Image: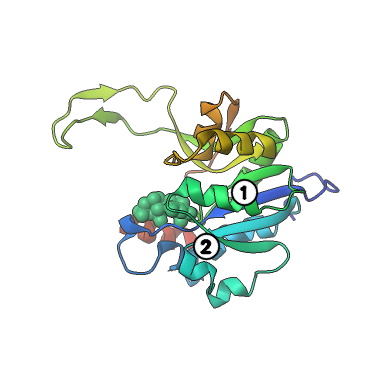
Amino acid sequence: MSPTSPRGSPPDVGVLLPAAGKGERAGDGAPKQFRRIAGVPMLLRAIRPFASHPRVREIVVALPEEHASAPPEWLAAVMGDRLRVVTGGATRAASVRRALEALDPACVLVLVHDAARPFVSAVEIDAVIAAAEQGTGALVAVPVSDTLKRSEDGRHVAATASRTGLYRALTPQGFPRGMLAEAYAAAGDTLDATDDAGLVEAVGGRVVLVPGRTTNIKVTTPDDFVLAEALARP
Ligand code: CTP
Ligand code: MG
């Protein structure tokens, strides 16, 4: 049980895990979310902190169609009342929308978390739930620490951009369910957003930042797998 979760609060949180991507930037043949990090599939690592959280009522995982109809054995082993699988869509946002439509109506708060972030901490999950419970959207974020350069052609520097006030948007992101549903309804079929808070912002919803950890990486490139193996070391 997560130490900072209020005991006795009802399990009213739904978790959507978009895991229907192709992992094109990761190289290799297998979808990156199924690849093992120190022996444990990335998706399973992303599921575990939510599956063990006392506030979580249901987890819906969006998978590529061929895997939704025949989930890998390690995923089938944890499927049941609290963890369901749906077929994702052509974009991340389309996958989230499908998962949201399938979510148990008793879930009044919704967290969305990238399956490609296998090192999310209980502290981050608790902070997002606590903020969303206040009626706003919330996302885990980290201040930008590198100096930023602008370049039109990828070689010649056109300008140095200020990093003051800039944050990297991580997941989980959490929302009162109605707020997220309204944002997706308003987005119509233009579903190219790479995060959910952006859709909520677009309909005027208030979104707050909660401090994230730089270890909550999104595994995107082959180099990220090297980093992930190091982070997974006991
Ligand atoms: N995702 C999804 N459905 C899609 C595309 C992405 O559910 N149609 C998920 C991915 O599986 C991942 C998360 O959204 O967990 C973040 O996306 P990203 O890191 O971009 O993963 P991929 O789209 O798989 O990778 P790439 O963009 O390199 O192909
Ligand atoms: Mg992608």
Residue that appears at 47% across and 54% down: 89
x and y percentages locating residue 54 in the rendered image: 76, 54
- The residue at the far front in this view is 189
Q: Is residue 72 above or below residue 100?
A: below
x and y percentages locating residue 10 in the rendered image: 82, 48
- For label 1, the SS is helix
- Residue at mark 1 to residue at mark 2: CA–CA distance: 18 Å
x and y percentages locating residue 165 in the rendered image: 44, 23
The amino acid beneath tag 2 is Leu
- The residue at the far bottom in this view is 73
Dividing the image into 4 quarters, which one contains the N terminus?
A: bottom right
- Front residue (pair 28, 119): 28
Give the side of residue 123 with respect to residue 153, left or right: right
What label does residue 43 carry, if any? Answer: 2
Of callouts 1 and 2, which one flags the residue occurring earlier in the amino acid sequence?
Answer: 2
Colour treatment of the image: rainbow
Q: Is residue 80 above or below residue 209?
A: below
Q: Which residue is mark 1?
A: 100
Q: Is residue 162 above or below residue 2?
A: above
The amino acid beneath tag 1 is Leu
